[in-house]
Image: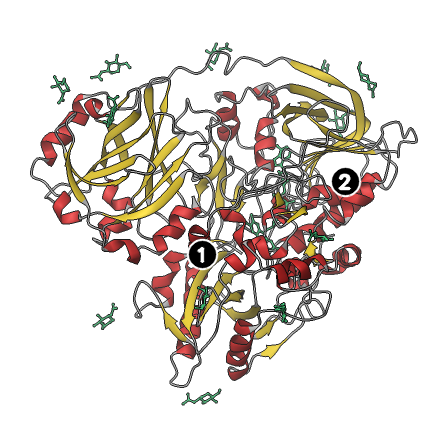
Amino acid sequence: MQDILLALTLAAGVLGQSSSTYVDSNTGITFQSFLDTSKDVFFGIALPTDTSDDVIGQIVGPADASWASFDFGSSMINNLLVVAWPYEGQVIASTRLTTGYTAPPEYIGSAAIKPISNGTFVNSTHFSYTYLCTGCAIESSSLRDNVGVFGWALSTTALTDASTTSAALTYHAAGFGAFGLDIDAARSDSFGSWAAMAASSNSTIPTIPKPPGSNSTLPVTTSNATYDYIIAGGGPAGIIVAQRLAETGADVLLIERGPASTYASGGEKVLDWNDTVTQYDVPALAYSLSSMDTDYCVDTASQAGCLLGGGTMVNAMMYVPPQPVDFDDKWPVGWKWTDVVASAERLYTKLPGTSVPSADGERYDQGAYDVLSKFFDGLGWSLTDIAESPDNKHNTYSHPHWSIGNGKRASPVTTYLPLAQSMPNFELQLETKVMRAVRNGSYVSGVEVETTAGNRQLINVNAGGKVILASGALSSPRILWNSGIGRSEQIQVVADGQTSVILPRESEWIDLPVGEGVQDHPIVTLKFQTGSLPALASAAFTNPSINDTEMFAQGEGLLTQSGQRLNFWSSAEASDGATRYFQGTCNAPSNNTVQMKIYLTHGLTSSGDLTITSAGNTEFAVQPWLNTDADREALATFIDQLLEYTRTSNSSLRYTSSTGTNDTGASLLDTFVSGSHFVGTARMGSDEGSVVVDTDTKVYGTDNLYVVDASIHPDLPTGNTQAIVMVAAEHAADKILAASVNGTEATPSSKFTTSRVIRTGFTNSYSQKQRKRHMHLPRAGRRSMLRSGLRSF
Ligand SMILES: Cc1cc2nc3c(=O)[nH]c(=O)nc-3n(C[C@H](O)[C@H](O)[C@H](O)COP(=O)(O)OP(=O)(O)OC[C@H]3O[C@@H](n4cnc5c(N)ncnc54)[C@H](O)[C@@H]3O)c2cc1C
Ligand SMILES: *[C@@H]1O[C@H](CO)[C@@H](O)[C@H](O)[C@H]1NC(C)=O
Ligand SMILES: *[C@@H]1O[C@H](CO)[C@@H](O)[C@H](O)[C@H]1NC(C)=O
Ligand SMILES: *[C@@H]1O[C@H](CO)[C@@H](O)[C@H](O)[C@H]1NC(C)=O
Ligand SMILES: *[C@@H]1O[C@H](CO)[C@@H](O)[C@H](O)[C@H]1NC(C)=O
Ligand SMILES: *[C@@H]1O[C@H](CO)[C@@H](O)[C@H](O)[C@H]1NC(C)=O
Ligand SMILES: *[C@@H]1O[C@H](CO)[C@@H](O)[C@H](O)[C@H]1NC(C)=O
Ligand SMILES: *[C@@H]1O[C@H](CO)[C@@H](O)[C@H](O)[C@H]1NC(C)=O
Ligand SMILES: *[C@@H]1O[C@H](CO)[C@@H](O)[C@H](O)[C@H]1NC(C)=O
Ligand SMILES: *[C@@H]1O[C@H](CO)[C@@H](O)[C@H](O)[C@H]1NC(C)=O
Ligand SMILES: *[C@@H]1O[C@H](CO)[C@@H](O)[C@H](O)[C@H]1NC(C)=O
Ligand SMILES: *[C@@H]1O[C@H](CO)[C@@H](O)[C@H](O)[C@H]1NC(C)=O
Ligand SMILES: *[C@@H]1O[C@H](CO)[C@@H](O)[C@H](O)[C@H]1NC(C)=O
């Protein structure tokens, strides 16, 4: 969804476009409308002449579309989306509100849509959804501010479960954009009589029967292979823990729901300029992945990677070693910096990262660095090396430090995983989703998995074995709820839902605060004009020159760098007496312009709650960002300070903004976007009852179920999260190895019976699919637009 939102930041360009008046013959309603003839989509609105917040809208799309949506917004976030799609001859509609990236969650709030039946139908060529949205203008910055810029999107990728209003939206690859509508012309005295048509029809959308068997039990087979450890999720935490456990000789199964990623791991998304690297391998493509066919999860509350390597394959490779205070403030005993430092050292030995990724020792495209480093020098801030001095985070700046090695994206996929795969007792199973831990009372006997084809299987652990969740902070909670662990409110949603999950009896549900207290870094982006500063267009990365691709083949040049050009850090004490840290991540998005993404980081106190829908998607019941006064004040004050620095007469930077040069820190807070740095959905601690896992990372109330990913982190770090996730996973492996299951040591297996295979589905044979020779990248016009937009890293 972010692309709609990005497009809207360019709204100025569409304001001049006039909307047209259209009288709908089915309903008699006069709309101000927008028609995209090439995509065959139509959007209309009608408004009342009084001050009511009601709106009438119409969405018409091709009958074979997966969904089409109308976005009520001219700013990036907190604008209502009305999404509609055809399903078995009827139209299903859903309201969404997005606060960050990826598939927008269902809207929770007072605005409501009702269909107008004469304008809601599916015919042989189109579907049409005409609706009254009561209270809708409240959720529309465009209507509140009388701006008249709206957005649309269209997808032709099938929804996983089109029968429910809560279906997770697929990527809108078919098209998206922004358009202007004449708000004044949309107002009509007839609004009341048109709106009455909604009241006289059914007040809610028709109830669509669930597909047959949707809550019946699917046939489940049992695997004849058993393991000492089963790990659910092949992201950074899962891979690190799997390797550390496998090196003891134990039988380890690592289950990843997505496909391979890097070329070396079997990834298929190779590039047209080099068919032995995938889009995930090339550091310079990190800022372009969102405009490509990238394996993001579609059922999580915000953006996450659903492929081998998880977030480390879709992230922007910032690799910020945690500083001691990141652990010392809130992590429990046994997890303070002095406890984890050896784990950190082990990580950095395998995955050191670099701030000079090009093999020739040069840094490329340094214009933004030069401008910004002078600016910060002028403020008296100092240059630091964040790998050498992780705790030098007050009024400092640095070259970006990246998870890059040998000129390519580096990750546990490129470092730990090959070590594990060289051991015969390790097995990786791709494209297989762990549904739940199979639990009888406190004992977990294994997992139930589902392949992409929809087949279910039970895989068991050996006596004394352990099941370890590593599916990420937005997905591990789903597995816990599906295992009857969490608050009964969410477990009941699973019980009543459509995901065919078999739960333990209600008397065996384990009451723990799963999903409660989720946290993330919020980001506010500022742009500044500066003197002559040439900026590379995104085509320099997505359609690189032969010179650059030849240098890349040697591990050198522009393409070995990710997108950032300078980072800075500061800190301040807020009114609640707590110190909060700030990170800046900077580049040159367009000519003569530098951009600073300002993150509020360690010390922030805001948090939210994650929950689950009946379709099995995770979403935010309470959003995690900027909901404490001290956080808002701290970030606003820091931004005001930066703006003030740049408003001095001789500053090299001049603030620019689409919303006006009168912006203040406080007025800019609402433009924040997610940092995609989620933690704390299955928190670790020693006070049973208020946390989910103990200091061995074991789920309270269970004998042998563990969580090792970002879910367990009780706090946010000063920098981006991947490094601290990896440090904590290294440390968790030690704890798990030391922990017994009711006195039964998880003794290393000496059987070495399993051979090293990469399995897809349930077949035991190595299946290397035919690689696609040529991958088509999206066309250039869209790319440059996307690149100039806000991003989360
Ligand atoms: C767009 C984006 C940009 C980011 N940029 C940066 C950055 O520049 N620097 C940085 O430090 N951090 C960044 N981050 C954050 C960082 O990537 C995450 O903190 C980190 O990846 C979290 O690791 P994890 O192991 O907890 O979970 P994840 O990385 O989310 O891994 C979870 C894995 O489990 C798999 N999985 C999920 N559910 C199941 C299931 N049911 N069964 C089997 N497998 C499952 C997923 O496919 C995935 O592979 C970014 C994140 C995103 C999304
Ligand atoms: C189907 O409905 C759409 C929208 O009202 C209309 O434009 C189209 O002509 C209709 N198609 C047919 C075959 O009637
Ligand atoms: C809907 O259309 C039918 C057939 O054209 C018409 O008789 C009816 O009055 C319309 N209903 C409303 C509420 O306009
Ligand atoms: C209301 O819904 C019912 C059941 O779906 C349907 O039979 C009926 O025709 C609908 N009534 C109107 C006015 O649309
Ligand atoms: C499906 O669930 C409903 C309500 O939860 C229940 O009444 C019904 O019997 C279930 N059907 C099957 C086939 O399990
Ligand atoms: C599992 O069963 C299949 C088919 O019966 C057999 O080929 C395979 O060797 C068995 N694997 C193990 C680990 O026993
Ligand atoms: C101009 O900038 C320098 C630092 O670069 C600073 O010392 C000086 O005070 C500034 N002058 C004015 C008028 O702001
Ligand atoms: C669960 O465990 C109990 C003993 O703890 C046992 O009696 C029961 O049969 C088990 N149930 C299942 C379904 O395995
Ligand atoms: C900067 O200007 C140059 C020359 O006009 C142009 O080729 C380049 O695309 C511009 N950069 C961006 C990011 O627009
Ligand atoms: C190739 O790119 C490098 C780095 O930008 C540059 O130094 C070199 O001159 C370029 N070579 C050619 C032939 O363009
Ligand atoms: C592709 O990149 C690899 C480095 O990852 C290099 O070894 C190879 O020569 C490149 N191939 C081409 C055709 O440039
Ligand atoms: C900025 O504020 C001034 C004084 O309040 C006002 O006159 C001006 O219109 C504002 N400018 C913008 C772009 O909002
Ligand atoms: C493990 O020990 C706990 C109590 O310490 C007990 O409740 C549980 O049933 C035991 N599990 C097994 C599998 O013996």
Q: Position of residue 221 (x, y in %)?
A: 69, 15
Quadrant in the picture for residue 433: top right
C-alpha separation, residue under disc 1 versus residue under disc 2 = 40 Å
Q: Residue at the front extreme? A: 546
* Residue 441 visible at all: no
Quadrant in the picture for residue 356: bottom right
Kind of residue at badge 1? Ser
557 relative position to 619: left or right: right
* Residue 527 numbered mark, or none: none
Tell me if residue 351 comes above or below residue 700 in the rendering: below
N-terminal label among 1 and 2: 2
Task: Assign a secondary structure to mark 1.
Answer: helix
Dot 2, crowdedness within 10 Å: few (<14), some or many (≥20)?
many
Q: Residue at x 85, y 28 (%)?
A: 754
Q: Position of residue 310 (x, y in %)?
A: 63, 43
Q: Residue at the left extreme? A: 189
**Ligand number 8: quarter of image:** top right
Kind of residue at badge 2? Ala
Q: Residue at x 30, y 26 (%)?
A: 127
Check disc 1 and report the residue beneath it: 784
Check disc 2 and report the residue beneath it: 242
Quadrant holding the N terminus: top left
Q: Determine whether the beta carbon of the residue marked 2 sits less than 8 angstroms from the nearest atom of ligand 1.
A: no
Q: Position of residue 443 (x, y in %)?
A: 72, 25
